[in-house]
Each structure stands twice: as C-alpha cells, then as structure tokens.
Amino acid sequence: MRRPASLVLLALAVFFTALSPLMRWYAFPRLAKIPPGQYQDMVLEAKPATLLDYGTMKAERVPEVTIVQTLKGDVAASERIEQSAGRDIVVWDTLSYVVGPDGKMVSEIPERYLFDAHSQEPVHATGEMVDGDPVRREGIEYKWPFLTEKRDYAYFDAQTRTSAPIHYRGTRTFHGLEVYYFEQTIPWTKVALPKKMPVKGITPESVEKMGTTRWYSTKRMFWVEPVTGAPVNGQEIHKEELRGGDLLPGGGKVTAFAGHVKMRDDYIDSTVALVTSQRTLVLLLTSYLPWGFLLLGGVLLALSLHLEARGRRPRAPAADGAPAPAPPSSDGVSVPARNVDP
C-alpha cells in the first residue's frame, strides 16, 4: 500500500505547489476589486478657519468649517460601461459639501469618477466630470492601488482639473497600522468658480464679468495602508482667494476660505477598523494562502519521498544463530536439522 499512497501524496504536492503562484498572480488580480455599489461618507473639519463674508466682502475668523464628503457607486453605469470596456469598472458619484458655523452652504462640488476596479487606473468615458465640467483624469484619486509601493504617484486635483505628483515621504505607524505617508503641494493656481455660489443672485458668470478670479493652493497629506491602498487619514492645509475685479474694494484680494482640514476622530476610528478587516482578506490572497500552499506542497513531497524510500528498502537478513532450514530427504520429506556439538 505504500507505493499508491506515495503517488497520491506526490500528486497533492504538485497540486498545492502549482496553486501557490496561481493564487498570487492569477486569482488575486481578479478577486481583489472595489465593489461597484460601494457607499461611504466622511466628515472633515477645519478648527478654526477663515471664511469670506459675502455681505461685507471681508474675511472673518470662524470657529469651524465642516466638509462632508459622500461617495456612492453607480452600479447601472458600471455595468453599462463594462460591456464596451471589457473589464470591471467602478463609477463613483462624489460630493464635497462645505458648510460654515451657521450651517449654511459655502461650496458644493460634485464629481463623477470612473476607474478600473482592480488597478484603480482611471477609465475615460462619457460622464467623467468635476462640477459639471468634462475632465480627463490621469493618475489616482481617493484611493491608491492594492499593494501600494514606496514611490511617487500621479494624483488628480479636482480644483485645478489637473494631475501632479504626490510624493512618498516615508513609512509611519498610525493607530497600530503600518502606513505610507504621502504629500502633495499645489501652488497658487487660478481655478474655476463653483457652479453653485453661497449667495443668491451671485453666479460664476456675474463674478467673471466683474473681472474677479478665484485662486487656490493646498498642501495635501495622506496616510495610506499599503496592502489595501486605502487612506486611513487625510488632511489639507487649504487656501482660497478671490482676486481683482469690481467685486472687491480696491480690486485687491481677499481670503475666501483657509484652514487646516482634518478628518474627524470618530471617522478615523471607523475607517481604521474597516481597513484592518479588508487588509486580512487581501493578505489571504497575496501572502497567507500562497505561502501556506507552498509549504504544504513541500511537506507532502517530503512524505511522498519518505514512503517511496521505505517501500524500496531491502528486507533484513536472518539473524545469526537461527536454525537453518531442514534439507529435503530423499523421499521429498524434510528432515529436521540437528545441532552438532563441537
């Protein structure tokens, strides 16, 4: 029974050894993907902040400004685009809604973001936009790829509608997780006015006719869990100004909004908990199962070789002093051998 058993063990060893690279290089790129119907929200705060009073056209110090970001996956749009693209596509409709301390809207910027569900690379299709303006994204936005690398990435800035490098600045520990820290600085750039202004009767077109322009600069910071590619914390040192034109007294410039924007603590805690659970699933496909199958294959191979070696081992000879077999007699009957004393 040893030889059939060794062959079965050998077959299992080959199977699990071959399954190890398949799990990492074939199954993982297909199974690890962003779900098309994902929904999440996030609250960020700037405490304190500087905000423009459109009644007096002067910047005022306020106790806080709140930014509510919502993200909703459009499953129907994803399925429609997948038919022509031939790959898994995610369509996110996002909204950044900024409110002042009085609860009134400061700005409202919607986006539609299309990307590959596996690699997070942008996908260009009808509907890709920021605040109603068609855009063509290059680089990532909101999320880094699975198995994020220690390098710079191109990151899309929704205000300028352009992409710029976001730089890897080192590995850190955040709430018990090893994370990669990234920074991006956008210098002062002239940007479009929001389609929805905070004061009735004022439109982007009317502001532009008066010769007033909007300028923007930010320092963007992300703490990214590298296995999932998900940011567990994000901050911005954000500045906006209105410059020139008849809208401003003397045609100078005034701060429209400025503050150090940070994620609220309760949202950081929930994000860390979610990312920690998702991290385990990704590690199953990229590390735990591939290495486990490879180790199991090695153990089964060793057992197979051990059984085969035992099956081929010759039997031991008779022990010294054992009685010799009786010689056959002339009539074919065996005669017991007798010991002869010396």
Image (cartoon, helix red, strand yellow):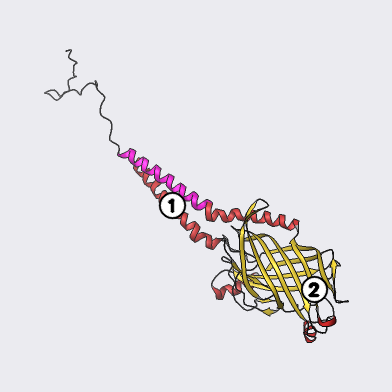
Q: Residues within 10 Å of mark 2 (few under 14, many from 20)?
A: many
Q: Residue at x 46, y 55 (%)?
A: 19
**For the N terminus, which image quadrant?**
top left
Position of 7 with respect to 95 (left or right) is left
Q: Is residue 290 above or below residue 260?
A: above
Name the residue type under label 1. Thr
Position of 207 with respect to 81 (left or right) is right
Q: Which residue is mark 1?
A: 17
Find residue 36 and name its label: none
Q: Quadrant of residue 6?
A: top left
**Residue with the most extreme right position:** 56
Query: Viewer-proximal residue, 256 or 187?
Result: 187
Task: Point out the stretch of residues depicted in magenta.
Answer: 288-312
Query: Viewer-proximal residue, 251 or 259?
Result: 251
- Quote the CA–CA distance across marks 1 and 2: 61 Å
Instruction: Label 2, secondary structure: give it.
Output: strand
Measuring from the top left, give residue 251's x and y in whole percent: 81, 82
Q: Residue at x 65, y 67 (%)?
A: 184
Query: Viewer-proximal residue, 177 or 90?
Result: 177
Q: Which residue is mark 2?
A: 256
Work out whether mark 1 precedes mark 2 in sequence or the reverse, and give the earlier one.
1
Q: Quadrant of residue 204?
A: bottom right
